[in-house]
Image: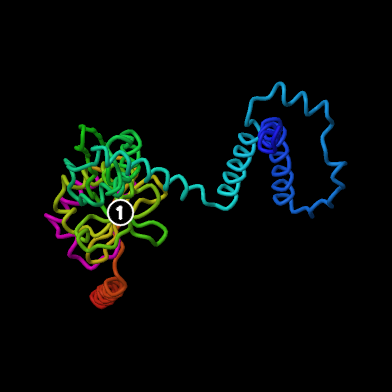
Amino acid sequence: MDGAGRLARSLRSLGPQADLKAAAIGAVVLLREWLGLPRAPAKPRLERQPPPRLIAFLERHLPRRAGVAATVLLLLGSAGLGVVKGGHLEAFIAALSDTRNAIANSAGFRITTVAINGRKQLTQDEVLGIGGVNGRSSLLFLDAATVRDKLKANPWIAEATVLKLYPGRLQIDIVERSAFALWQHDGRLAVISDDGAVLEPYLSRRFISLPLVVGKGAETHARDFLALLARYPQVKNLTKAAIFVGERRWNLRLKDGLDIRLPENNVGNALAALSKLDKEDRLFSRDIVAVDMRLPDRLTVQLSEDAAKAREELFKDRKSKKKAGDA
Protein backbone atom coordinates (compact mmCIF):
# COMPACT_ATOMS: atom_id res chain seq x y z
CA MET A 1 0.00 0.00 0.00
CA ASP A 2 1.38 3.44 -0.92
CA GLY A 3 1.83 6.43 1.39
CA ALA A 4 -1.24 8.31 0.07
CA GLY A 5 -3.54 5.43 1.04
CA ARG A 6 -2.11 5.24 4.55
CA LEU A 7 -2.63 9.00 5.00
CA ALA A 8 -6.27 8.79 3.91
CA ARG A 9 -7.01 5.93 6.34
CA SER A 10 -5.29 7.86 9.13
CA LEU A 11 -7.49 10.93 8.63
CA ARG A 12 -10.73 8.91 8.50
CA SER A 13 -9.88 7.01 11.64
CA LEU A 14 -9.13 10.18 13.62
CA GLY A 15 -12.35 12.09 12.72
CA PRO A 16 -14.39 12.19 15.99
CA GLN A 17 -11.28 11.79 18.14
CA ALA A 18 -9.58 14.84 16.62
CA ASP A 19 -12.75 16.93 16.79
CA LEU A 20 -13.36 16.11 20.45
CA LYS A 21 -9.76 16.74 21.31
CA ALA A 22 -9.85 20.20 19.69
CA ALA A 23 -13.14 21.03 21.42
CA ALA A 24 -11.75 20.03 24.82
CA ILE A 25 -8.60 22.10 24.38
CA GLY A 26 -10.61 25.13 23.20
CA ALA A 27 -13.05 24.83 26.11
CA VAL A 28 -10.25 24.73 28.69
CA VAL A 29 -8.44 27.71 27.16
CA LEU A 30 -11.60 29.85 26.97
CA LEU A 31 -12.68 28.91 30.50
CA ARG A 32 -9.30 29.87 31.93
CA GLU A 33 -9.34 33.20 30.07
CA TRP A 34 -12.84 34.07 31.37
CA LEU A 35 -11.83 33.19 34.95
CA GLY A 36 -8.47 34.93 34.71
CA LEU A 37 -6.51 31.82 35.66
CA PRO A 38 -2.92 31.29 34.57
CA ARG A 39 -2.25 28.88 31.80
CA ALA A 40 -1.88 25.27 32.91
CA PRO A 41 1.66 23.88 32.65
CA ALA A 42 2.24 21.65 29.69
CA LYS A 43 2.13 17.93 30.40
CA PRO A 44 4.04 15.19 28.66
CA ARG A 45 2.32 14.06 25.50
CA LEU A 46 1.65 10.57 26.81
CA GLU A 47 -0.21 11.90 29.91
CA ARG A 48 -2.55 14.03 27.75
CA GLN A 49 -3.77 11.14 25.66
CA PRO A 50 -7.34 9.96 26.54
CA PRO A 51 -7.70 6.26 27.49
CA PRO A 52 -8.02 3.98 24.44
CA ARG A 53 -11.38 2.55 25.58
CA LEU A 54 -12.85 6.06 25.88
CA ILE A 55 -11.65 6.88 22.36
CA ALA A 56 -13.22 3.73 20.99
CA PHE A 57 -16.53 4.46 22.76
CA LEU A 58 -16.67 8.03 21.43
CA GLU A 59 -15.82 6.94 17.90
CA ARG A 60 -18.59 4.37 17.99
CA HIS A 61 -21.46 6.43 19.49
CA LEU A 62 -20.87 10.10 18.65
CA PRO A 63 -21.83 11.45 15.20
CA ARG A 64 -19.16 12.69 12.89
CA ARG A 65 -18.03 16.27 13.40
CA ALA A 66 -19.59 16.37 16.89
CA GLY A 67 -16.45 18.03 18.19
CA VAL A 68 -16.61 20.75 15.54
CA ALA A 69 -20.25 21.43 16.44
CA ALA A 70 -19.38 21.59 20.14
CA THR A 71 -16.54 24.00 19.44
CA VAL A 72 -18.78 26.25 17.34
CA LEU A 73 -21.46 26.28 20.04
CA LEU A 74 -18.85 27.09 22.66
CA LEU A 75 -17.50 29.97 20.60
CA LEU A 76 -21.00 31.32 19.97
CA GLY A 77 -21.81 31.10 23.67
CA SER A 78 -18.57 32.88 24.55
CA ALA A 79 -19.32 35.61 22.02
CA GLY A 80 -22.85 36.04 23.41
CA LEU A 81 -21.52 36.28 26.95
CA GLY A 82 -19.01 38.87 25.83
CA VAL A 83 -21.76 40.95 24.17
CA VAL A 84 -23.90 40.89 27.32
CA LYS A 85 -21.05 41.58 29.77
CA GLY A 86 -19.64 44.30 27.57
CA GLY A 87 -22.95 46.18 27.47
CA HIS A 88 -23.38 45.76 23.71
CA LEU A 89 -26.65 43.80 23.78
CA GLU A 90 -28.85 46.68 22.63
CA ALA A 91 -26.48 47.59 19.82
CA PHE A 92 -26.33 43.93 18.77
CA ILE A 93 -30.13 43.63 18.74
CA ALA A 94 -30.41 46.90 16.78
CA ALA A 95 -27.92 45.59 14.23
CA LEU A 96 -29.92 42.37 13.80
CA SER A 97 -33.13 44.40 13.43
CA ASP A 98 -31.57 46.64 10.80
CA THR A 99 -30.31 43.61 8.92
CA ARG A 100 -33.69 41.86 8.75
CA ASN A 101 -35.41 45.14 7.86
CA ALA A 102 -32.93 45.69 5.03
CA ILE A 103 -33.71 42.22 3.67
CA ALA A 104 -37.48 42.87 3.91
CA ASN A 105 -37.12 46.28 2.26
CA SER A 106 -35.21 44.78 -0.63
CA ALA A 107 -38.00 42.22 -0.98
CA GLY A 108 -40.60 44.99 -1.50
CA PHE A 109 -41.87 45.66 2.03
CA ARG A 110 -40.38 49.14 2.44
CA ILE A 111 -42.73 51.73 4.05
CA THR A 112 -43.41 54.10 1.17
CA THR A 113 -46.55 55.91 2.42
CA VAL A 114 -47.41 57.12 5.93
CA ALA A 115 -50.81 58.60 6.82
CA ILE A 116 -51.22 60.18 10.29
CA ASN A 117 -54.68 61.37 11.31
CA GLY A 118 -55.72 63.38 14.36
CA ARG A 119 -52.51 65.24 15.12
CA LYS A 120 -52.68 68.91 16.17
CA GLN A 121 -49.81 69.70 18.51
CA LEU A 122 -47.38 67.05 17.29
CA THR A 123 -45.71 67.01 13.89
CA GLN A 124 -45.55 63.94 11.66
CA ASP A 125 -41.86 63.44 12.38
CA GLU A 126 -42.55 63.64 16.13
CA VAL A 127 -45.28 61.00 15.89
CA LEU A 128 -43.04 58.64 13.91
CA GLY A 129 -40.13 59.24 16.28
CA ILE A 130 -42.31 58.50 19.31
CA GLY A 131 -43.51 55.27 17.67
CA GLY A 132 -39.97 54.20 16.76
CA VAL A 133 -40.60 54.25 13.00
CA ASN A 134 -37.66 55.41 10.88
CA GLY A 135 -36.36 55.20 7.35
CA ARG A 136 -34.89 51.73 7.96
CA SER A 137 -38.15 50.21 9.23
CA SER A 138 -39.92 47.64 7.06
CA LEU A 139 -43.66 47.02 7.12
CA LEU A 140 -43.10 43.26 7.35
CA PHE A 141 -41.27 43.34 10.70
CA LEU A 142 -43.03 46.41 12.16
CA ASP A 143 -44.88 45.42 15.36
CA ALA A 144 -48.09 47.47 15.30
CA ALA A 145 -48.87 46.72 18.97
CA THR A 146 -45.42 47.93 20.07
CA VAL A 147 -45.76 51.14 18.04
CA ARG A 148 -49.20 51.75 19.58
CA ASP A 149 -47.88 51.23 23.12
CA LYS A 150 -45.04 53.68 22.50
CA LEU A 151 -47.45 56.27 21.16
CA LYS A 152 -49.83 55.91 24.12
CA ALA A 153 -46.92 56.27 26.53
CA ASN A 154 -46.47 59.84 25.30
CA PRO A 155 -48.52 62.26 27.46
CA TRP A 156 -49.79 64.21 24.44
CA ILE A 157 -51.45 61.08 22.95
CA ALA A 158 -54.58 59.71 24.64
CA GLU A 159 -55.41 57.00 22.08
CA ALA A 160 -53.67 55.48 19.07
CA THR A 161 -54.45 52.98 16.33
CA VAL A 162 -51.80 51.53 13.99
CA LEU A 163 -52.68 49.74 10.75
CA LYS A 164 -50.27 47.99 8.37
CA LEU A 165 -51.54 48.00 4.78
CA TYR A 166 -49.29 45.79 2.66
CA PRO A 167 -47.04 46.06 0.83
CA GLY A 168 -45.84 49.51 1.96
CA ARG A 169 -48.49 51.72 3.58
CA LEU A 170 -48.66 52.62 7.28
CA GLN A 171 -51.69 54.37 8.80
CA ILE A 172 -51.65 55.89 12.30
CA ASP A 173 -54.74 57.43 13.92
CA ILE A 174 -54.22 59.33 17.17
CA VAL A 175 -56.35 61.28 19.63
CA GLU A 176 -54.33 64.09 21.15
CA ARG A 177 -54.83 65.64 24.55
CA SER A 178 -55.35 69.39 24.60
CA ALA A 179 -53.40 71.90 26.67
CA PHE A 180 -55.88 72.92 29.37
CA ALA A 181 -54.04 74.86 32.08
CA LEU A 182 -50.69 75.69 33.60
CA TRP A 183 -49.91 73.91 36.87
CA GLN A 184 -47.38 75.26 39.38
CA HIS A 185 -46.06 72.86 42.00
CA ASP A 186 -42.79 72.86 43.98
CA GLY A 187 -41.59 75.88 42.04
CA ARG A 188 -42.01 74.19 38.66
CA LEU A 189 -44.48 75.13 35.94
CA ALA A 190 -45.99 72.55 33.57
CA VAL A 191 -48.66 72.35 30.89
CA ILE A 192 -51.47 69.95 31.83
CA SER A 193 -54.49 68.46 30.07
CA ASP A 194 -58.02 68.55 31.46
CA ASP A 195 -57.57 65.07 33.01
CA GLY A 196 -54.51 66.26 34.95
CA ALA A 197 -51.85 64.61 32.75
CA VAL A 198 -48.61 66.60 32.62
CA LEU A 199 -47.96 67.23 28.94
CA GLU A 200 -44.63 69.05 29.09
CA PRO A 201 -42.69 71.62 31.11
CA TYR A 202 -43.78 75.18 30.45
CA LEU A 203 -41.24 76.51 27.96
CA SER A 204 -43.24 77.93 25.06
CA ARG A 205 -45.03 81.26 25.37
CA ARG A 206 -47.85 79.93 23.19
CA PHE A 207 -49.37 78.55 26.42
CA ILE A 208 -49.15 81.84 28.34
CA SER A 209 -52.89 82.53 28.01
CA LEU A 210 -53.88 79.30 29.80
CA PRO A 211 -55.37 79.59 33.32
CA LEU A 212 -52.96 79.03 36.18
CA VAL A 213 -53.63 76.57 39.01
CA VAL A 214 -51.27 76.16 41.97
CA GLY A 215 -50.69 73.50 44.60
CA LYS A 216 -50.60 69.77 45.17
CA GLY A 217 -53.66 68.06 43.71
CA ALA A 218 -54.68 71.14 41.72
CA GLU A 219 -53.96 69.38 38.41
CA THR A 220 -56.64 66.73 38.96
CA HIS A 221 -59.28 69.07 40.45
CA ALA A 222 -58.76 71.99 38.06
CA ARG A 223 -61.25 70.88 35.40
CA ASP A 224 -64.31 70.92 37.69
CA PHE A 225 -63.33 74.09 39.53
CA LEU A 226 -62.51 76.11 36.41
CA ALA A 227 -65.78 74.98 34.82
CA LEU A 228 -67.61 76.32 37.90
CA LEU A 229 -65.60 79.55 37.86
CA ALA A 230 -66.49 80.10 34.19
CA ARG A 231 -70.15 80.55 35.20
CA TYR A 232 -69.20 83.79 36.95
CA PRO A 233 -67.27 85.89 34.39
CA GLN A 234 -67.34 88.88 36.77
CA VAL A 235 -64.92 86.93 38.97
CA LYS A 236 -63.18 84.76 36.34
CA ASN A 237 -62.03 87.67 34.17
CA LEU A 238 -60.20 89.23 37.13
CA THR A 239 -58.61 85.97 38.36
CA LYS A 240 -54.88 85.51 37.92
CA ALA A 241 -54.48 82.13 39.65
CA ALA A 242 -56.52 79.50 41.46
CA ILE A 243 -54.69 78.04 44.46
CA PHE A 244 -55.61 74.63 45.87
CA VAL A 245 -55.12 74.75 49.65
CA GLY A 246 -54.58 71.59 51.70
CA GLU A 247 -56.05 69.53 48.86
CA ARG A 248 -59.48 70.59 50.18
CA ARG A 249 -60.49 74.05 49.02
CA TRP A 250 -59.58 76.92 46.68
CA ASN A 251 -58.27 80.45 47.01
CA LEU A 252 -58.39 82.99 44.19
CA ARG A 253 -55.58 85.47 43.52
CA LEU A 254 -56.92 88.38 41.46
CA LYS A 255 -54.81 90.34 39.00
CA ASP A 256 -54.51 93.31 41.38
CA GLY A 257 -53.23 91.03 44.19
CA LEU A 258 -56.51 90.62 46.07
CA ASP A 259 -56.85 87.22 47.79
CA ILE A 260 -60.26 85.56 48.04
CA ARG A 261 -60.48 82.62 50.44
CA LEU A 262 -63.33 80.40 49.30
CA PRO A 263 -65.12 77.88 51.53
CA GLU A 264 -64.64 74.14 51.23
CA ASN A 265 -68.34 73.58 50.47
CA ASN A 266 -70.97 75.54 48.53
CA VAL A 267 -68.30 77.15 46.37
CA GLY A 268 -70.86 78.11 43.73
CA ASN A 269 -72.87 80.13 46.23
CA ALA A 270 -69.71 81.94 47.36
CA LEU A 271 -68.77 82.84 43.79
CA ALA A 272 -72.30 84.08 43.13
CA ALA A 273 -72.14 86.29 46.24
CA LEU A 274 -68.76 87.69 45.14
CA SER A 275 -70.08 88.50 41.71
CA LYS A 276 -73.11 90.28 43.18
CA LEU A 277 -71.01 92.28 45.65
CA ASP A 278 -68.72 93.51 42.90
CA LYS A 279 -71.62 94.52 40.65
CA GLU A 280 -73.50 96.35 43.37
CA ASP A 281 -70.76 97.64 45.67
CA ARG A 282 -67.63 97.48 43.49
CA LEU A 283 -66.00 95.17 46.03
CA PHE A 284 -62.93 94.40 43.91
CA SER A 285 -62.20 98.11 43.41
CA ARG A 286 -61.96 98.89 47.08
CA ASP A 287 -58.68 99.26 48.97
CA ILE A 288 -58.66 95.75 50.42
CA VAL A 289 -56.15 92.88 50.33
CA ALA A 290 -58.26 89.84 51.26
CA VAL A 291 -61.84 88.59 51.39
CA ASP A 292 -62.44 85.62 53.69
CA MET A 293 -65.55 83.54 52.92
CA ARG A 294 -64.60 80.36 54.77
CA LEU A 295 -67.27 80.81 57.43
CA PRO A 296 -70.75 80.11 56.06
CA ASP A 297 -72.54 82.92 57.97
CA ARG A 298 -70.19 85.85 57.41
CA LEU A 299 -67.80 87.58 55.05
CA THR A 300 -64.62 89.16 56.42
CA VAL A 301 -62.72 91.87 54.56
CA GLN A 302 -59.09 92.74 55.32
CA LEU A 303 -58.15 96.31 54.49
CA SER A 304 -54.79 97.30 53.09
CA GLU A 305 -52.33 98.95 55.47
CA ASP A 306 -53.02 102.43 54.11
CA ALA A 307 -56.77 101.89 54.20
CA ALA A 308 -56.56 100.60 57.76
CA LYS A 309 -54.62 103.71 58.88
CA ALA A 310 -57.05 105.99 57.10
CA ARG A 311 -59.99 104.21 58.73
CA GLU A 312 -58.37 104.48 62.16
CA GLU A 313 -57.74 108.20 61.69
CA LEU A 314 -61.31 108.66 60.55
CA PHE A 315 -62.64 107.01 63.69
CA LYS A 316 -60.33 109.13 65.84
CA ASP A 317 -61.52 112.26 64.12
CA ARG A 318 -65.17 111.33 64.56
CA LYS A 319 -64.55 110.49 68.22
CA SER A 320 -62.85 113.81 68.89
CA LYS A 321 -65.66 115.73 67.15
CA LYS A 322 -68.23 113.86 69.21
CA LYS A 323 -66.45 114.83 72.45
CA ALA A 324 -66.32 118.45 71.34
CA GLY A 325 -70.02 118.42 70.59
CA ASP A 326 -70.86 116.96 73.96
CA ALA A 327 -68.84 119.64 75.68
Residue 114 to residue 17: above or below: below
- Residue named by callout 1: 213
In the image, 197 versus 45, the foreground residue is 45
Viewer can see residue 188? yes
In the rendered structure, does residue 76 fall within the stretch colored magenta? no
Instruction: Tell me the colour scheme of the image.
Output: rainbow
Q: Is residue 170 left or right of residue 154?
A: left
| Residue 50 percent coordinates (x, y) | 82, 34
Asked where in the image residue 281 lies, by quadrant, the reply is: bottom left
The residue at the far front in this view is 1
Q: Quadrant of residue 8?
A: top right
Judge by depth and name the residue closer to the eye, 291 or 208. Answer: 208
Q: Quadrant of the C terminus?
A: bottom left
Specify whether residue 271 is painted magenta.
Answer: yes
> In the displayed structure, does residue 257 sit left or right of residue 23?
left
Task: Give the image location of residue 307, x and y in percent.
Answer: 26, 72
Judging depth in this view, the residue of 88 and 171 nearest the camera is 88
- Which residue, as the protein is rendered here, is positioned at the far left? 279
Q: Amino acid at mark 1?
A: Val
